[in-house]
Image (cartoon, helix red, strand yellow):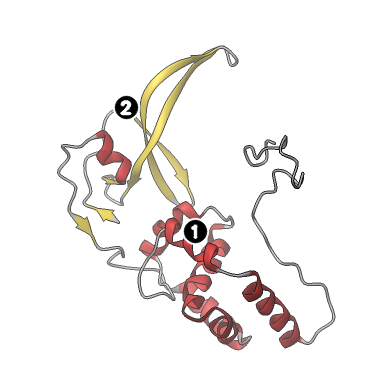
Amino acid sequence: MKYNPVPRPDRTVIVKNNGYQYVYLTQCVKYSPRLKRSVPSRVSIGKLDENGMLIPNKKYFELFPDSNGLDELGDRADFISIGPHLVVDKISNQLSLYSLLETVFHDKADKILDIATYMIMSENNVMQYFDDYGYGHSLFNKANFTDSTIGKLLGSLTVCQMDLFIRSWVTMQNKDGIYVSYDSSNMNTVAGSLTLAEYGHAKDN
């Protein structure tokens, strides 16, 4: 969901990420005994547009409920970049990748290609910024979508579908070699049925 731009509030800082300028509001400052200095507590409230105005997110309206920026905007920019879409579209058709995705994953094929294109362009797998990418880029899917939609999409894919896709893709290539299936999930414990082992924070436990 996109909202009307509003003036940037005081007590904010700008953090640049993947070509966008995200705005964080300083809520309070706490002293850290470990760091032996004061550390600000900040929360993201949106991003800057090309005019320096703040495009707020839902958190902004929780903190500023009286704001007048609640009118919903369209989920696409007036001008969008089509380069990444054209390149991936040509490659996926040349390799028959799109037809395979459509055969295995049916109506989810467009979103899967959009996610793959986003990961290539952003060089990471942080899905919370996908709708920012989709706002300014041509997509295979008819409409832009958010990270929550991506979560539901990935959760709906079955092991049988993924196995069928990988086996079919390897067969189509008909070449000797090793194929690596990319998985960004984190394994916190492999203790099986041991009740003493508990899941913790990814990459920490």
Q: Which mark is residue 71?
A: none
The image position of residue 180, as x and y in percent, is 75, 67
Question: Considering only vertical position in the picture, is 122 above or below 9?
Answer: below
Kindly identify which residue carries mark 2. 11
Which quadrant, please, contains the N terminus?
A: bottom left
Mark in the foreground, 2 or 1:
1
Residue in the image at 40% along x and 67% along y: 137
Quarter of the figure with residue 58: top left
**Nearer to us in this view, 3 or 191:** 191
Residue in the image at 50% along x and 55% along y: 127
* Position of residue 25 in the picture relative to residue 94 (left or right): left
* Position of residue 180 in the picture relative to residue 10 (left or right): right
The image position of residue 153, as x and y in percent, is 49, 65
The image position of residue 143, as x and y in percent, is 35, 71
Residue in the image at 70% along x and 48% along y: 187
* Earlier residue among tags 2 and 1: 2
* Callout 2: SS: loop
Q: Amino acid at mark 2?
A: Arg
Contact flag, marks 2 and 1 (Cβ < 8 Å) = no
Question: Considering only vertical position in the picture, is 25 above or below 154?
Answer: above
Which quadrant, please, contains the C terminus?
A: top right
* Callout 1: SS: helix
Kindly identify which residue carries mark 1. 151
* Position of residue 111 in the picture relative to residue 165 (left or right): left
**Nearer to us in this view, 117 or 193:** 193
Quarter of the figure with residue 204: top right
Residue in the image at 65% along x and 72% along y: 162
The image position of residue 89, as x and y in percent, is 52, 80
Q: Amino acid at mark 1?
A: Gly
Alpha-carbon neighbours of circle 1 within 10 Å: few (<14), some, or many (≥20)? few
Q: Looking at this rendering, what residue extends furthest in the right direction?
A: 176
Distance between the alpha carbons at the discs numbered 2 and 1: 33 Å
